[in-house]
Amino acid sequence: MVDCAGLPVIAVRGADEDGGPGPIRAFHNVCRHRAGPIAQCDGLAAKSLRCRYHGWTYGLDGQLKSAPEMQGVEGFDVADVRLPSLAVREWQGMVFACVDETAATPFDELVAGIDARIGDGRGLAGYGHHQHAAYDIACNWKVYVDNYLEGYHVPHVHPALNRMLDYRSYRTELARWHSLQWSPLESDPGLYGDGDALYYWLWPNTMLNILPGRLQTNRVLPLGVDRCRVEFDFYYPVDDSGEARARRDADRAFSDEVQLEDLRICEDVQRGLASGSYVAGRLNPLRESGVHHFQELWRAATGVR
């Protein structure tokens, strides 16, 4: 159950005809009677969806099955009522949904080439969800995205992260609808160990932060012209040993540290933008190509110049 740009959404998995798990479906979590909530929690095993306002009940295919005390009502037939659905794709163990598929970037184009870059060794599809974190930030959502899309600030804003990354080897690769920042990484075995740090941005507001033994998803949600919410979900290989729990705790603590550093600088930048003093400066071609890429996509989508 999530909020998708103000729209309450519920995802369900029904049974296939042979009794096995069926496809995941996503619906508006809004009863077609008088807008009550169909579901208010995650993870329940259920054979139907029942609105807790007036008890209208839907199947896991979104079709209305029953409506209390509506039998014989003129012009009403349960067969005519169903929950609006969203377009859904499962990819790398994650579920992506789109309210308006006709207006969306085709999903295969959005992630083109990422499977090959990640490779089978990462095993993301087998990771399990462990925790969620959210931060409200006093900046426009595009300020946060701009900040994410460059490593130019890392030596100045993230001292601990900078010691792990090889800044001289830090590179940005651009695709049509996403970009990748990557660097070799060296860290304590009790945190990530050694490997590559892969930071994927997917148009327009989704990030995949992939480090050895960890996937972190990151969504940036606009709340107003100068406010946004950043939501993180953490995924790890399924392992409940003491060592694995310690690494997860260390990752969460370090991620909080990095995020608070980003939060502070983004809020400072927002104040600078609102000051009336700022005139757009020149981007660094080597370090800020991802920022330019995002801004050009935004201009094309909105017609703003």
Image (cartoon, helix red, strand yellow):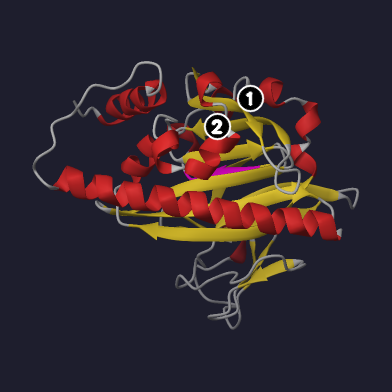
- The location of residue 108, given as percent across then percent down, is 60, 25
- Pick whichever, 97 or 84, lies toward us: 97
User: Does the magenta segment cover residue 136?
Assistant: no
- Pick whichever, 213 or 46, lies toward us: 213
Q: Secondary structure at mark 2?
A: strand
- In the image, is residue 182 above or below residue 95? above
- In the image, is residue 268 above or below residue 37? above
Tell me the kind of residue under disc 2: Tyr
Q: Residue at x 77, y 59 (%)?
A: 245
Residue located farthest toward the top when viewing the structure as drawn: 285
Relative to 124, 241 lies left or right: right
- Pick whichever, 257 or 44, lies toward us: 257
Q: CA distance from mark 1 to mark 2?
A: 9 Å
Disc 2: CA contacts within 10 A as few (<14), some (14-19) or many (>=20): many
Residue located farthest toward the right when viewing the structure as drawn: 18
Q: Residue at x 40, y 29 (%)?
A: 152
Q: Residue at x 58, y 79 (%)?
A: 52
Q: Which residue is mark 1?
A: 114
Task: Please give the label number shown on residue 200.
Answer: 2
- The location of residue 105, given as percent across then percent down, is 48, 29
- Pick whichever, 73 or 133, lies toward us: 133
- The location of residue 44, given as percent across then percent down, is 73, 68
Magenta segment boundaries in residue numbering: 95-99
- In the image, is residue 300 above or below residue 4? above
Label 1 with label 2: CB-CB less than 8 Å: yes
Count of numbered badges drawn on the protein: 2
Q: Main secondary structure of the magenta part?
A: strand
Q: Secondary structure at mark 1?
A: helix
Quadrant in the picture for residue 273: top left
- The location of residue 86, given as percent across then percent down, is 55, 46
Relative to 110, 262 lies left or right: left
